[in-house]
Image (cartoon, rainbow, N blue to C red):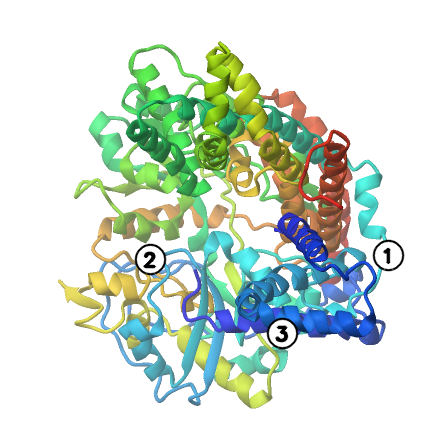
Amino acid sequence: MNDVSVRARPARRTRAEAQDPAFSTPPAVRRKRTWRERAKRDRVLLLMAIPGLVLLLAFHYVPLLGNLIAFQEYLPFVPLGHSPWVGFDNFAVIFNGDPAFLNALRNTLEITLVQVVLVFPAPILMALLLNSLLSERLKQIVQSILYLPHFLSWVIVVAVFQQMLGGSGLLNNALRAGDHGTVNILGDPHNFIAVITSQVIWKDTGWATILFLAVLSQIDASLYEAASMDGASRWSQIWHVTLPGMRGIIILLLILRLGDSLSVGFEQIILQQGAFGRDASEVLDTYVYNNGVLGGQWGVAAAVGLVKGIVGVLLVFGANKVAHVFGEAGVYQKQ
Amino acid sequence: MSANTPFGRRTFLSGALLSAAGLAGVGSLAGCTTVTRSTDIKAINKAVALPDYVRWKGPKPDLPTVNPLMPDAYYRYPATTKVLSGHPGDGSRLQGTVPTNTPVPPSLDRNQYWKALNGRLGLDLGLSITPGGDYPNKFQTALAGDQLGDVWNIFGAPPYLPQLLQAKAQDLTEYLSGDAIRRYPFLANLPTEAWRGCVFAGGIYAVPVARGIIGTNVLLSRQDLFEERGVDMTFKNVDELQSLAGQMTDERSNKWAFAAVPNLVLSAMLGLPNTWQEKGGRFTSENELDAHKDMLEIGRRMTSKGLVHPDSVSAPNAKVWFNQGSAAMTQDTYTALPGFYQQNVAGKAFTIGIPTIPGPDGKQGNVWLPNPNNSITAVSKASPDRIRMILDALNWFAAPFGSKEYTFRKYGVEGHDFDFSNGEPVLTTTGNSETGLGAFPIEYIVDSPIPIYYSGHPDGTDSVYRNMLAMQPHAIQNPTYGLYSPTNSTKGSLLSTVLSNATNDIYLGRKPVSSWDSVVSQWRKGGGDAIRSEYERAFEAKN
């Protein structure tokens, strides 16, 4: 959510600046009147924005203030104002090489890396495949089937995988019935990343495809005509027309994904921690939960969460800078 | 998930905005008081005069109660008497926070039982009900948001419990200590052992949801399945247990002997002490003993031979497997029986047998007693009059088996929630829903002692009574019960996850049994040694 606001706000300002010819040298009186004029002109839109703004403030910005407990020795039964301040003591766990924390960090980074490489391109490929289907009807049917899993909660998805691949699931029952010996898929820590990655792909690829399909439909058809007149094959058309047309949105989503790179799916993982063991499956989010909520170390958990958020913001800004260097629009632009 | 909760959408929003306002005042408040994370073991473990125990003489049991610790046993529902007159309440609102292990019952406006309950109590009872698994999280957040209400169940051991209770809960000592409790005869009917778990820092800070010996983990066997296969379900040693388990396993038809490795059964068979061993004031964890490694080896062998359900670790669902018959044996408590009977899918034949557990010498083994309490319940600070009124209500909640109040509490309104069939109360469909399968969550505020009685299943009474009679003289208590260790309070749950993860790794063959030594030394360094020395000092303070 925060990423969206980062994107939306400065963009709105730039547009306003562009529309207001007097913006660069604003005489105080004039500017005030202009502001009022604009507020008057947009009052309906502004009124419509208020509920959203209140929600954003109440559920995103106000709770942010709770991060204060990262600097306190906080106990839930002592009022916030009475908890003693401890400076940066709670952050020690991040820097003093606590093996449990390092393990969680390592697992998180491994999962992020695998998911950026495998999960991120999946909807792009899927969109290209769907786009090449000729029958519009078939395309719609396939698309509906593909995005339905998105609406299942993780509890259901994990249960479905358990029923199919678990020790007494469909696959192993069939193997047992045929005296073939069983395979241990859900329960072998080595399979952890593979299993959760395939679950993510199965659940969310279809949904993520929608965005790319929308972009594909916007690519000017005359470009394809021109390309085929010049004798370009289907491959060259994808390479020289389709992909360049999608580049903007791909980079935008990649940058936003980087901001989330330290969150790798809390619910999905906590549901399967028992099966795979904590060594393989502890990530930063579950570490915060296990230590903070269950272990009562609220301050330490808040500190780790805070650092995680800051790293995410820095990654978004950094990646955006890199995008600008390569001449791309990125998430937002400064004029 | 919560029914009839005070924590509605509006309070949620106003809470969010208020907390913003509260934060503005943080600077000015800081430093005026600080609650320390006290490590004064002696002070936290100070003793107090426990409430008197006055056992209520109920209807005559069908089987003799040989030992005072044993619950009364009945084949049939006894004739009941009204034991309390008037209403305990003063018409005010009483708000509670409780867990439930059955489906959350419908809210007050759609629940005849709840309305009748409020009428009899003379109270406007509001409950925030959360499913058991989520309860610790709900508790922590409700605590931080000051939303716990007047009475709140404490499940397990939240971090810094003594300090939490001192900050938020009423010290009930003057109302309950010694003979003061006699004013509340049904609270006085709760055993002394249960009250020991309610004492913190020299005060009685809670009332027990007492279970006692009936909460003991034993080995439950599907007697009907054993008989069907012609296998004897009794055993004298580990080899015999494994051999009968082999006969009960048929992987190709999805049948396994055990729902999970029965750790507590094996521990009793190997003569391990109950969690901790106390000798002359020195404590040793059972995890440190060589016999524990023997247990791991047996568990590993059972798993690798395929005697244990293959999803026992990855997707445990023991109760369902036992009911379906895909596991012939499961480790569970005596109190699990009513649930199994209620959810029986195997038809009339369904019979639960409880084999006795032999010790290393082949005779009855030392079975581990559980914590005498399922949980405890604290009362928020209030005026003496209100505290007395609340205790009157709790006394009503504890009205024992054999009273009309008990029948109403567990079964609801006759003709609507339940009917008598052959003299046994049987819940109707409406009753099942309204009372939460006969376990309306006021039973997690306080409950009467649980009798050995299973509506329509006299065979269950026989199985439990016989097993308990044999086991009771050999039952051993955890020596740390009633002692408080600050390190255990904060690190205990994390440390036990480390141990249980390592145990699973060994059972599933991911790590050898020999890896246990390094796990134990990790446990000792990570807090185990600190917990030990705190328990030793606490033991000294209490004895």
Question: Viewed as shown, does residue B299 lie left or right of A111?
Answer: left
Circle 2 chain: B
Callouts 3 and 2 on one subunit = yes
Residue B251's quadrant in the figure? Answer: top left
Circle 3 chain: B
Would you place residue B269 above or below residue B31 in this image? above
The residue where tag 2 is placed is B452
Residue type at mark 1? Answer: Gly
Callouts 1 and 2 on one subunit = no
As measured in the structure, the alpha-carbon distance from the residue carrying label 1 to the one carrying label 3 is 30 Å
Q: Position of residue B265 (x, y in %)?
A: 47, 37
As measured in the structure, the alpha-carbon distance from the residue carrying label 1 to the one carrying label 2 is 56 Å
The residue where tag 3 is placed is B169
Find numbered disc 1 in the image and state the secondary structure of the residue it sits on: loop
Callouts 1 and 3 on one subunit = no
Q: In this orientation, which residue lies closer to the viewer: B441 or B227?
A: B441
Find numbered disc 2 in the image and state the secondary structure of the residue it sits on: loop
Residue type at mark 2? Answer: Ile
Residue type at mark 3? Answer: Ala
